[in-house]
Structure formats: structure tokens, C-alpha cells
């Protein structure tokens, strides 16, 4: 139905991994640029801390967008662009990818007829335009459509679903071109108060700076409120800014949250395995994991762990001398078990030694997720802005 003062655009609302977002066929959107960004912000209800006048859910993990088209690139079936829409900030960022939203791209492409469905499992080769890297999704299919139901349980998502296996081994150096952007497994960040902190910068999936929680006086079992405390957030922002300065000589670390740069690199606090309680109040035992993580994204504690961050963490765990490898201790082959605020997530990682520049070669680096189409139809936004 036409409306005199509103525009309609077709979109699909999907839960992908532990995130939720709007999925579009690219041809339904305006061309890249200010008009596209205006439409995405208006559809989400940004800027507004509640996003009450849009489809956003007032949290970073529910203010995401996937833009998808057939690809004419060799070795790719789909081109996929990820957009992180601000909440109270009037911005759209394309500076990285989202591992959770990526897990919805294959099912979306199959259901939209953008790739041929293969009964059983359909392999979808996804070119991520944000990073220029390829991800391969193995999507369960029945009767020509992506399956939603199954017995795979993903911490942070109620119930179970069909297991989608995501291989991210081609995303090493996704943003900086190197697994270890500075060339070393550990670096030193000097804070304004004179403290010297050891960190590991690892770029696989997305660049992440990993910090020992104990170096900030934390135990690894803190609540969201404790991680969200102003003093902790100020420390994390400074560390993230100064880690960025290690990558970009002359960079002013104070601008790390300026529009256009918001969100990357991610920052994660790592702690040895230990007992803790999840956000839902369940008890998790330390014997069930290799280490604990608090990931901070857009100034907030991530409710679980971003898919790209889990890839970075797993990669870093196989680098001799990295902070992550030291915290994790003895690891089992081929898997990293990550304890996070919603439970434990396994990441597949098959690694072998490589040359000095690459440090490690990954035969497999990825994880399993579930995804489900929640709604499809026309989304409306005011014609005038």
C-alpha cells in the first residue's frame, strides 16, 4: 500500500548467531553513499538511545545490517557488505565485518534465490567487501530452503538450530594485511599514568587487541555493570587508542571513537579458566573451558563474543609467545573453548607452523552458528528524512 509521506523498502529481519539485523538485496537499496546511510539510520531509528522509532533494538548487537548481491568475482558466489549502525550516534560504520551477522548471509542468499540450493548442504562462498576477504558457509538445506531447526546449541541463543559451519581461514590479515599487524606476538602500551601493559594485536576476522584482565585489576568474572564502569571504560578506550597508534604512526589515540573509526580495533580482556555465572544466572565450571573472555564493543560488554573476535582469539591462541597462548595454557588440538558472559563457545582451529612472516598457517579457522529468518516484508521510513 502506497503512503503519501513514507517510502517502503523490502527487507528481511534475521537472527544470525547471537546478533540480529536487517538483511537487504543490494539492488533494493540506494547506491553506496549518504542517501543509503540516511535510509539505514532512519530504518533503525538512529540516533536515539532506544531506537524507538525504528527497527533497531537499542543494543550494538541488534543495530546491524547485511547488504547482499550476486558476485562476479572469481571464487565467490555472493558479495556481502556489513554495516554497523550507531544507536545514539548519528553514523554508519563499514570499518569491519561481523562474524555473527555473516552466518546469516548464506541462508539469506539461498532463500532469496541468489545462489542455487543444493540439497543436504549448500556451500556459499562469500566475499566480504569490508575486508576484501572470503568466508565459506556450509548451510544445511531441505526442499530448496535453508534449514532453521536442528540440534546445535549456541550459547546466548535460546533453544537449538541447524548448524552452519563457517570457515574464516582466508580472513587472516583482514584489515591490516598481517596476522600480527606489528610483526610481534606481544607489544607494550604505555598509558598516560605511566603504566606499561603487555598486549597482543591479532588480525584474523577483525583486528583485536587482547589484554590480561588482571593487568586492570579485574578477575575475569565481573558483571556487565563492573565492565561498564566509567574508570574501566576509560582505560579500555585508552588501550584501544594506543594500540591503534601502534598500527598508524602519528595517530592521535584520543580520536579512536571519532565517527568513521568507531569500533575497531575491538578489545578483549582475557583471563585463565575459572568458575563463573552467566548473564542468565547459570553456573559454568572452569574445567569446561580453555580461558575466559570479556569482549567490549562500542563501549559495552558484549553479551557473548563476536564471531570475528572468536576467530582472532583462536588464531592468537596458536601463536607462540602471545598473551592469549600464555593465558590459555595447555590446549587441546583443533579446538579453543571460550568462556564468555553467555556460556562456552567452541572455535575450530587447525594450525601448523609457517614462515617467520606468517608465524602460523591455518588449515581451518572458524566456528558454527545458527540463523533464522524472523520476518520479511516492507520496512517504512519518512520520505523527508
Image: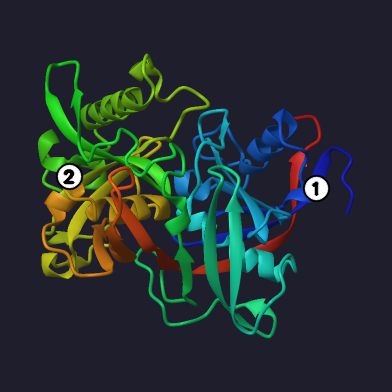
Decide: few, some or many residues near mark 2? Use Cα within 10 Å; few <14, some 14-19, many ≥20: many
Q: Is residue 378 above or below residue 154?
A: above
Residue 262 picture location, percent across and down: 46, 30
Q: Is residue 59 visible?
A: no
Secondary element type, mark 2: helix
- Determine which residue is flagged by label 2: 323
Please identify the quadrant where the C terminus is shown.
Answer: top right
Look at 71% across and 68% down and name the residue there.
115
Secondary element type, mark 1: strand
**How many numbered marks does the figure carry?**
2
- Residue 275 as seen in the image, left or right of residue 136: left
- Residue 28 as seen in the image, left or right of residue 145: right
- Determine which residue is flagged by label 1: 8
Look at 27% across and 50% down and name the residue there.
316
Which-is-in-front pick, marks 2 and 1? 2
Decide: few, some or many residues near mark 1? Use Cα within 10 Å; few <14, some 14-19, many ≥20: some
From the viewer's side, name the closer residue of 368 and 380. 368
Q: Is residue 363 above or below residue 61?
A: below
What sort of colour scheme is used for the picture? rainbow
- Residue 8 as seen in the image, left or right of residue 37: right
Residue 216 picture location, percent across and down: 14, 34
Amino acid at each position: 500500500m502506497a503512503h503519501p509521506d513514507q517510502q517502503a523498502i523490502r527487507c528481511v529481519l534475521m537472527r544470525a548467531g547471537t546478533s540480529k539485523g536487517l538483511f537487504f538485496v543490494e539492488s533494493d537499496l540506494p547506491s553506496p553513499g549518504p542517501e543509503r546511510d540516511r535510509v539505514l539510520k532512519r530504518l533503525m531509528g538512529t540516533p536515539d538511545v532506544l531506537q524507538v522509532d525504528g527497527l533497531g533494538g537499542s543494543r550494538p548487537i541488534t543495530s546491524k545490517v547485511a547488504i547482499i548481491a550476486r558476485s562476479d568475482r572469481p571464487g565467490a558466489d555472493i558479495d556481502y557488505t556489513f554495516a554497523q549502525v550507531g544507536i545514539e550516534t548519528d553514523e554508519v560504520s563499514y570499518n569491519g565485518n561481523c562474524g555473527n551477522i555473516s552466518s546469516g548471509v548464506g541462508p539469506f542468499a539461498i532463500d532469496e534465490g541468489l545462489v542455487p540450493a543444493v540439497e543436504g548442504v549448500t556451500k556459499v562462498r562469500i566475499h566480504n567487501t569490508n575486508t576484501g576477504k572470503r568466508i565459506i558457509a556450509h548451510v544445511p538445506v531441505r526442499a530448496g530452503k535453508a534449514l532453521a531447526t536442528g540440534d546445535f546449541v549456541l550459547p546466548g541463543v535460546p533453544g537449538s538450530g541447524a548448524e552452519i559451519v563457517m570457515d574464516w581461514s582466508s580472513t587472516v590479515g583482514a584489515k591490516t594485511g598481517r596476522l600480527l599487524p606489528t610483526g610481534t606476538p606481544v607489544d607494550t602500551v604505555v598509558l598516560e599514568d605511566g603504566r606499561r601493559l603487555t598486549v597482543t594485536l591479532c588480525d584474523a576476522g577483525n583486528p583485536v587487541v587482547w589484554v590480561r584482565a588482571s593487568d586492570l585489576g579485574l578477575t575475569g568474572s565481573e558483571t556487565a555493570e563492573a565492565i561498564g564502569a566509567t574508570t574501566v571504560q576509560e582505560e579500555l578506550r585508552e588501550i584501544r587508542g594506543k594500540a591503534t597508534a601502534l598500527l598508524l604512526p602519528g595517530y592521535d589515540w584520543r580520536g579512536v571513537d571519532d565517527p568513521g573509526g568507531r569500533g575497531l580495533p575491538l578489545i578483549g580482556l582475557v583471563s585463565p579458566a575459572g568458575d563463573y555465572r552467566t548473564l542468565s544466572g547459570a553456573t559454568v565450571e572452569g574445567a569446561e573451558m580453555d580461558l575466559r573472555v570479556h569482549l567490549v564493543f562500542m563501549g559495552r560488554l558484549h553479551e557473548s563474543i563476536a564471531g570475528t573476535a572468536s576467530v582472532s582469539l583462536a588464531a592468537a591462541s596458536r601463536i607462540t609467545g602471545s598473551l592469549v597462548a600464555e593465558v590459555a595454557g595447555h590446549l587441546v588440538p583443533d579446538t579453543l573453548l571460550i568462556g564468555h558472559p553467555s556460556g562456552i563457545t567452541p572455535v575450530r582451529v587447525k594450525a601448523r607452523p609457517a614462515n617467520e612472516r606468517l608465524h602460523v598457517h591455518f588449515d581451518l579457522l572458524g566456528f558454527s552458528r545458527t540463523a533464522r529468518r524472523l520476518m520479511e516484508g516492507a520496512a517504512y521510513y519518512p520520505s523527508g528524512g
